[in-house]
Image (spheres, grey):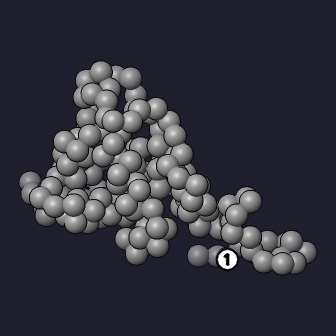
Amino acid sequence: MSTDTDRMEGFLSLSATLTAFSEFDLRGTGQAEDYLATVVAAVGADNTDALLSAYASIQSGTGAQGASSDGLLRARILSDDRLGPIARNIMKLWYIGTWYAMPQEWTQAFGVGAVAGTFVVSASSYIEGLVWPAIGANPPGAKGPGYGTWAAPPTIVAT
């Protein structure tokens, strides 16, 4: 990636595809900068840029030859020994707000970044996790639905 802005744009575009939330929704969590910094710190800039470059080539249609972008994402990224674990961790990061330790096989093959292990990215990452809007709930202990809402049964809106 040539600039931090390019890296962020690529990260948001990839994240939107991986999470099925729009870039607007992802930016709205206020976590994009922290999450990108976490990925770079955990797996290194070279591995992060390799993932974003692979995704950019899928988006630009390089070598697509009629294959769907979903199929290419699965074949070129999610099934890749180097890129797949990073992409799966990015999904978990957005949904749960926690960075999970990279598999031991991955770190042996591709190295360890400046940070290792499993950790919650920030105090707000739990609250802003995509799991809550995905299941139509509020995070326990945060973002209360309002006074007295407990008095009525929950409603699930049909989509």
Asked if residue 11 shows in the view, the reply is: yes
**Which quadrant does the N terminus fall into?**
bottom left
Residue 158 is left or right of residue 148, and the answer is: left
Query: Residue 58, percent across and down?
Result: 18, 57
* Image quarter hosting the C terminus: bottom right
Percent across and percent down for residue 26 are 43, 67
Give the residue at x 39% y 62%. Answer: 32
Left or right position of 153 against 128: right
Task: Name the foreground residue: 97 vs 87.
Answer: 97
The spot of residue 43 in percent (x, y) is 31, 38
What residue does disc 1 label? 157
Q: Amino acid at mark 1?
A: Val
Q: Residue at x 35, y 51 (%)?
A: 37
Residue plotted at (40% across, 75% down): 24
Task: Quadrant for residue 127, please give it.
Answer: bottom right
Residue count near mark 1 (Cα–Cα under 10 Å), binned few <14, some 14–19, many ≥20: few
Vertical arrangement, residue 52 with respect to residue 117, above or below: below
Question: What SS does tag 1 mark?
Answer: loop
At 41% from the left and 44% from the top, the residue drawn is 89
Q: Is residue 87 above or below residue 57?
A: above
Give the percent coordinates (x, y) of residue 94: 47, 55
* Numbered marks: total: 1
Q: Taking the image as drawn, is residue 18 in sight?
A: no
Q: Quadrant of residue 31?
A: bottom left
Which of the 4 image quarters holds residue 125? bottom right
- Could you say which is closer to the camera, residue 110 or residue 56? 110
Is 1 left, or right, of 121 in this rendering?
Answer: left
